[in-house]
Image (cartoon, grey):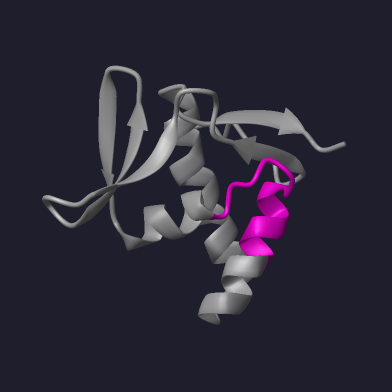
Amino acid sequence: MTPLIAPDQVPYLPRGVRLADDRVRGLRILQAPERAMQLDQIGDAILSELDGARSMGQIARDLASRYNAPEDQIAGDICDFLTGLIERRMVFVKDAP
């Protein structure tokens, strides 16, 4: 899979896409028009960091520090996960200001 996001780019949830709690099933989901995606703990941790201001690299550093994990491994996992969501148009990317 070719990465669709660089470490210096800012990922964000586009209009109409949001994180939500499925209270019936006790799950976190990513909702978009006409579709929804069940999230595991890792996906939820990544998407909860998308604020439209921090770059993917900054998010990777923060998560690596929080979970005491190698930053390069976290960055690779984030890149792979977000690339899949970018392809589905559930995450957008912009250049850092």
Q: Looking at the image, which residue is at 58% across and 67% down?
A: 63
* Picture coordinates of residue 23, whole percent (x, y): 19, 52
Is residue 1 left or right of 36 when viewed as pictured?
right
* Picture coordinates of residue 45, whole percent (x, y): 45, 60
Q: Quadrant of the C terminus?
A: top right
Q: Looking at the image, which residue is at 64% across and 57% down?
A: 59
| Nearer to us in this view, 26 or 96 | 26
Asked if 46 appears above or below 30 in the picture, the reply is below
Asked if 26 appears above or below 7 in the picture, the reply is below
**Res. 69 in view:** no
* Picture coordinates of residue 82, whole percent (x, y): 50, 40
* Picture coordinates of residue 68, whole percent (x, y): 55, 82
| Nearer to us in this view, 5 or 28 | 28
Q: What residue range appears in magenta?
A: 49-61
Most extreme residue toward the bottom, as rendered?
68
Most extreme residue toward the front, as rendered?
23
| Nearer to us in this view, 34 or 68 | 34
Most extreme residue toward the right, as rendered?
97
Quarter occupied by residue 70: bottom right
Is residue 97 left or right of 52 when viewed as pictured?
right
Q: Looking at the image, which residue is at 66% across and 49% down?
A: 56
**Res. 68 in view:** yes
